[in-house]
Image: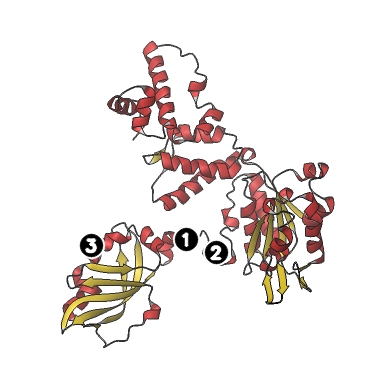
Amino acid sequence: MQQIDPKAVIPFGEYDNVLVVDDRGRTLYYDIADLNILVKLGHRPEDFLGRDVTTFYTNLPKEESTLFTVLRTGSAMPNIVQRLVTKTGSEYTSKSSTYPIIEDQKIIGAIEFSTHFFGKDQLALLEGFAVHPMYRKNGTIYTVDDLISESPAMLAVKERVRRVAVRDTTVLLSGPTGTGKEVVAQALHNLSRRFAGPFVSVDCGAITEDTMEPLLFGSANVTMEGSSELAGLFEQAQGGTLFLDELNALPVTLQPRLLKAIEEKRIRRAGGMSDLILDCRIIASVNENPEELLEAGRLREDLYYRLAVVQIDLPPLKERPEDIGPYIRHFIHYYNRRMDMAILGLDDESMDAFRRYDWPGNVRELRNAVEAAFNNTDGSEIRLADLPGRLLKRTGKDELRNPALEQGNLKDAIDGYERRLIESEYLKAGGVLAETARRLGISKQSLKYKLDKYGLRE
């Protein structure tokens, strides 16, 4: 019969993690509340099994380990607080209660209940869980600080967001796809007095004649067996903000019903018998020029004027090149955390390609380009060969599409052509050596030599 030393009461409710070791301190079982924390600390669950846990820390000799002390003394150690430093350099505070497991008056193992606490200096470890942990419970992940801006145009937008947010006025956000309208909408919500309420977003392109009323207004079905009620998005946003994303995708025939709800501030569930008074702020967005939408009859004038009490226009990225560098730094920091990498930045050629590109997909495309480069690179710096092909083609960096006549030394000209050819095929092959060699018709050994010769890989 195995038992835990009953001298102390185990405060199960206070702890998140459970660790069981044998009489030699080797891990038999480890249940951690959030595996993401384990990832941030640089470990995988299977790393612990069968191993001495003290080997994962730089400041935890066996003499100071609660588990080994309990195994040695047979006495429980409740409510012990320790500052731990992992081999990966991560730091956190652990509060634990450790107890011996006894069988026939012999200590055969120990069990430890623990919770991890992160101080201000370790908050970076938790950034991956939500961009803004203070706000994530209201349905948002962005605040005004996520509006990356050094350009005068975006600094003006940011200031206007701060000014407008505190009022309950309806707002229309206008700008091409990928310019950050969702970020602005969430920033408006989190700066408003409604920040404690829900932020509810709806893609207007997904609304049809059949789905509009139950989706937006809810439904109430009364049958012989009873009644069932379903809250619509307006009702779900009570006390908070309803964001109507890409309003221009909503069929014009459905727009009067939306206008009526916004104007009257009341709705009735489909099949319902009574009205619900609305208490939510309305923010809408369009990804086309509002004036052109009005002229084409795709946006009703009365709905537009009701929503555009305040209109905030977001400029495309190509009109604010000052923001490209800050966005690159922001996303490098973001993907270093997400992918557990240590990319320092872009080399000069890559940065030049980013600045020369016109970014038709705006900030969203820039973010995707950085993510693609992270997946292609094998060094500490993003190089030209790591960038998406479309970016190279549209900036003239894909010189093989239209090679200029080389001047001067023949050997240098041949070397230059060879370098560009290898770089192009290496990019197309996604950095896979075997595929690149096959494309070029040379051996892998020869390819490795040429890649090193031209500095195309670390």
**Residue 136, disc:** 2
Q: CA distance from mark 3 to mark 2?
A: 35 Å
**Residue 55, disc:** 3
Residue drawn at the location 59% of the way across and 46% of the way down: 150
**Viewer-closest of 453 and 14:** 14
Residue drawn at the location 63% of the way across and 53% of the way down: 182
Q: Is 405 drawn above or below residue 364 in the view shown?
A: above
> Which comes sooner in the sequence, label 1 or label 2?
1
Label pair 1/3, CB-CB below 8 angstroms: no
Residue, disc 1: 129
Question: What number of labels is visible?
Answer: 3
Q: Is 400 drawn above or below residue 135 in the view shown?
A: above
Label pair 1/2, CB-CB below 8 angstroms: yes
Farthest front residue in view: 224
For label 1, count other residues whose C-alpha is less than 10 Å away and answer few (under 14), some (14-19) or many (20+).
Answer: few
Quarter holding the C terminus? Answer: top left
State whether residue 163 appears in this view.
yes
Q: Give percent across and percent down for residue 398.
A: 50, 26
Q: Amino acid at mark 2?
A: Arg
State whether residue 167 appears in this view.
no
Q: Amino acid at mark 1?
A: Phe
Q: Amino acid at mark 3?
A: Thr
Quarter holding residue 319: top right
| Secondary structure found at label 2 | helix
Q: Give percent across and percent down for residue 4.
A: 25, 82
Quarter holding the N terminus? Answer: bottom left
